[in-house]
């Protein structure tokens, strides 16, 4: 297949990705699931690089959900170790490329080695002005919304806000994603047609794109296909064109 053509004037500002299918990729090769996660890390590197080169402003990836704690402890441990390894190895280069790392989710509840690595990544890249690389870690959209409602309720209780003044902005400002525009394009790999508690508020008008490729085999060309398809879509936001 030819490399898809990208219309630079119709690039999504923000791409979000549900990176799925690592376990199935490993299973197909009779390997432990953890090897699938390791292979997925390579896809992530390529994806970050491609998005930054194209001039995408925000890339959000779903790395670990609030529901992923239900997995066997050794798989969860491996994912945490892989996160530390990924940031440890990639941080200098990401920083050199002027990429700003941001994290959404209850990342303070991650094991302390992860937290230390995440905080180093956030502080080192804090003033970078290139692509925002937003990592969803221990992220669940419903938990994010509950937290927002609690914060808003406290403001009302303390007389700082009246219920009638609560609008879309009030809610968006209390989400982890408060500094990031809504995704324009959401990609999910591995053929699964569901959202799995990812960015429920933020994707109200996001264009969805599903790939049958498992995450470790999601190539640069497949990403370009998603972006190229996005360029053909007509977004109406409930209006008419
Ligand atoms: C995605 O791959 C990675 C995470 C959820 C952390 P999976 O581990 O969900 O792979 P499958 O869906 O079992 O193939
Ligand atoms: C979603 O994938 C979470 C991440 C990619 C981190 P899952 O594999 O956890 O989703 P379900 O369980 O198939 O819905
Ligand atoms: Mg999965």
Image (spheres, rainbow, N blue to C red):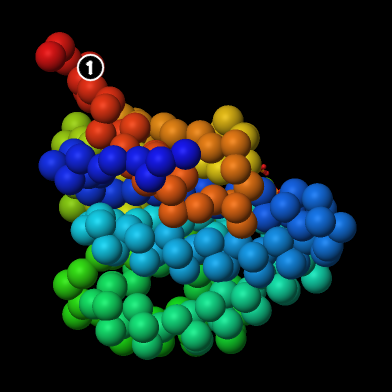
The secondary element bearing badge 1 is classed as loop
Q: Residues within 10 Å of mark 1 (few under 14, many from 20)?
A: few
Q: Residue at x 83, y 62 (%)?
A: 31
Q: Is residue 217 above or below residue 163?
A: below
Residue for point 39% across, 64% down: 48
Q: Is residue 111 left or right of residue 147?
A: right
Give percent across and percent down for residue 20: 61, 48
Q: Is residue 195 visible?
A: no
Q: Residue at x 60, y 36 (%)?
A: 212
Residue at 71%, 73% in the rendered image: 78
Q: Is residue 9 visible?
A: yes
Q: Which residue is mark 1?
A: 238
Depicted 21 relative to depicted 110: above or below: above
**11 with respect to 75 (left or right):** left
Q: Nearer the viewer, residue 175 or 152?
A: 175
Nearer the observer, 177 or 4: 4
Image quadrant holding the C terminus, namely top left
Label 1 CB less than 8 angstroms from ligand 2: no
Q: Position of residue 51 (x, y in %)?
A: 32, 58
Tell me residue 42's x, y (percent): 55, 68
Instruction: Return the x and y of residue 98 as percentages of the image width and height.
Output: 24, 77
């Amino acid at each position: 297949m030819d490399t898809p053509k990208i219309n630079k004037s119709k690039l999504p500002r923000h791409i979000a990705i549900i990176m799925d299918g690592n376990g199935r990729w490993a299973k197909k090769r009779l390997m432990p699931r953890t090897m699938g996660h390791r292979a997925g890390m390579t896809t992530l590197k390529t994806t970050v690089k491609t998005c930054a080169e194209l001039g995408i402003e925000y890339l959000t990836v779903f790395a670990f959900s609030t529901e992923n704690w239900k997995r066997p402890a050794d798989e969860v441990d491996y994912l945490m170790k892989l996160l530390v390894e990924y940031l440890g190895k990639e941080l200098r280069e990401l920083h050199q490329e002027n990429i700003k790392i941001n994290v959404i989710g209850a990342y303070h509840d991650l094991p302390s080695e992860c937290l230390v690595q995440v905080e180093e990544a956030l502080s080192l890249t804090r003033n970078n002005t290139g692509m925002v690389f937003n990592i969803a870690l221990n992220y669940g959209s419903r938990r994010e919304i509950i937290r927002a409602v609690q914060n808003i309720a406290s403001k009302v209780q303390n007389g700082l806000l009246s219920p009638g003044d609560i609008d879309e902005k009030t809610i968006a400002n209390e989400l982890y994603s408060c500094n990031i525009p809504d995704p324009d394009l959401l990609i999910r790999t591995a053929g699964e047609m569901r959202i799995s508690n990812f960015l429920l508020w933020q994707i109200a008008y996001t264009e969805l794109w599903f790939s049958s490729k498992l995450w470790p085999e999601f190539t640069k060309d497949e990403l370009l296909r998603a972006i190229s398809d996005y360029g053909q879509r007509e977004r109406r936001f409930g209006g008419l064109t």
